[in-house]
């Protein structure tokens, strides 16, 4: 694995992850034996939805909001998750218990349309019900990213509207976002900043994007970007503390001249951004309002401890 010290999705390696158990269609199997068919619709066509969850001090953060998004996404593409909400909740608890996890874990719930009779797009060729997989790994965000801040690069790949590819849907197909990230990595950055089809700033390839301008917090509308659960929680916590938050169109010029910048996501929470397209943002170090917002977010969603 190449250097991921400050990647937005980077984490501290943990040897315990070599022996974790994975939940595959109701069975707990060792990581090395956790497989799906090569004829699975998710493997062949990215036909499915997923959700990421974070375990902190015995609690899944914003659990119900994540499950709402998972089931809504599945319904929107005509997948009926056979376990139902109660069954998925039981499976989450079961995989955590089987792995002895109490803190510092990241889970990924993956639902595909299932195994097909042949490799084609047509959903009528499904042989049986959906494939459901839950992975749970120990993942602590790398402290270097929070201490130094991320570097972003503005990709030539754009986000899309719901008429092309609805980013509110957590689809397994992420190729456009991965292409943007590859550009950013090749440019020496940690994450890609992406514009919407009109040229306004939308989001990063895996996180929601914010700037601080004149003491106000700005983030994009959700028309062409993820409807982030961490993003929504931070906005609510900021507004409750009397901080002005604007969900608005913003240009790259406004981003470059911002006082601070940061991104939000399930794994990293709130992570500072200190450089975009080679330009230093603000003072070039994580800003004070970013630190305050991270504290407000954690106070709002973390369990006591």
Image: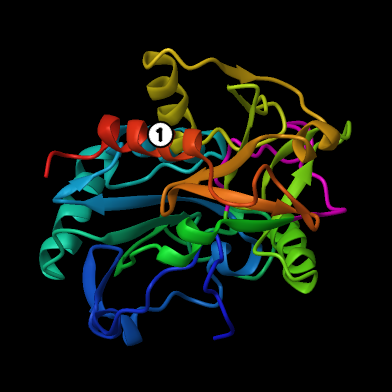
Which of the pair 46/198 is nearer the observer? Answer: 198
Residue 233 in the image, given as x and y percentages of width and height: 40, 29
Majority secondary structure in the magenta region: loop
State whether residue 33 is above or below residue 152. Answer: below
State whether residue 229 is above or below residue 33. Answer: above
Residue 228 in the image, given as x and y percentages of width and height: 51, 36
Which of the pair 206/77 is nearer the observer? Answer: 206
Which portion, as a residue range, is magenta? 153-171
Q: Quadrant of the C terminus?
A: top left
Residue 68 at least partly seen? yes
Location of residue 140 (image quadrant): bottom left
Name the residue beneath numbered marker 1: 292
Q: Residue at x 31, y 36 (%)?
A: 62
Instruction: Tell me: 301 left or right of 222.
Output: left
Q: Residue furthest front?
A: 283
Residue 103 in the image, given as x and y percentages of width and height: 19, 58
Which of the pair 185/137 is nearer the observer? Answer: 185
Instruction: Tell me: 76 left or right of 281.
Output: left
Q: Residue at x 78, y 40 (%)?
A: 256
Q: Quadrant of the N terminus?
A: bottom right
State whether residue 106 is above or below residue 224. Answer: below
SS at circle 1: helix
The way the protein has been coloured in the rendering is rainbow
Q: Residue at x 70, y 54 (%)?
A: 275
> How many C-alpha atoms fall within 10 Å of the one at disc 1: few (<14), some, or many (≥20)?
few
Location of residue 133 (image quadrant): bottom left
Residue 173 at least partly seen? no
Instruction: Tell me: 172 left or right of 278.
Output: left
Magenta span includes 159: yes
């Amino acid at each position: 694995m190449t250097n991921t010290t400050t990647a937005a999705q980077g984490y501290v390696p943990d040897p315990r992850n070599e022996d974790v158990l994975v939940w595959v269609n109701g069975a707990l199997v060792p990581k090395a034996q956790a497989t799906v068919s090569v004829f699975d619709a998710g493997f062949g066509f990215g036909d499915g939805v997923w959700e990421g969850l974070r375990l902190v001090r015995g609690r899944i953060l914003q659990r119900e909001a994540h499950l709402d998004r998972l089931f809504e996404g599945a319904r929107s593409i005509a997948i009926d998750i056979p376990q139902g909400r109660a069954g998925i909740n039981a499976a989450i608890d079961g995989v955590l218990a089987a792995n002895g996890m109490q803190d510092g874990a990241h889970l990924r719930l993956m639902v595909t349309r299932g195994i097909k009779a042949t490799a084609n797009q047509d959903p009528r060729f499904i042989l049986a019900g959906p494939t459901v997989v839950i992975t749970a790994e120990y993942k602590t965000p790398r402290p270097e990213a929070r201490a130094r801040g991320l570097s972003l690069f503005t990709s030539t790949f754009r986000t899309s509207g719901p008429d092309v590819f609805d980013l509110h849907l957590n689809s397994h197909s992420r190729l456009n976002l991965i292409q943007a990230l590859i550009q950013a990595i090749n440019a020496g950055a940690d994450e890609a900043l992406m514009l919407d089809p009109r040229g306004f700033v939308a989001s990063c390839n895996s996180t929601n994007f914010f700037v601080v301008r004149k003491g106000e917090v700005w983030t994009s509308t959700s028309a062409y970007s993820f409807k982030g659960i961490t993003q929504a929680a931070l906005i609510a916590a900021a507004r409750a503390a009397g901080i002005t938050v604007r969900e608005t169109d913003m240009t790259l010029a406004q981003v470059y001249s911002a006082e601070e910048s940061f991104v939000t996501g399930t794994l990293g929470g709130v992570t500072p951004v200190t450089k975009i397209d080679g330009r230093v943002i603000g003072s070039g170090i994580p800003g004070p309002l970013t630190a305050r917002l991270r504290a407000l977010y954690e106070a709002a969603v973390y369990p006591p401890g």
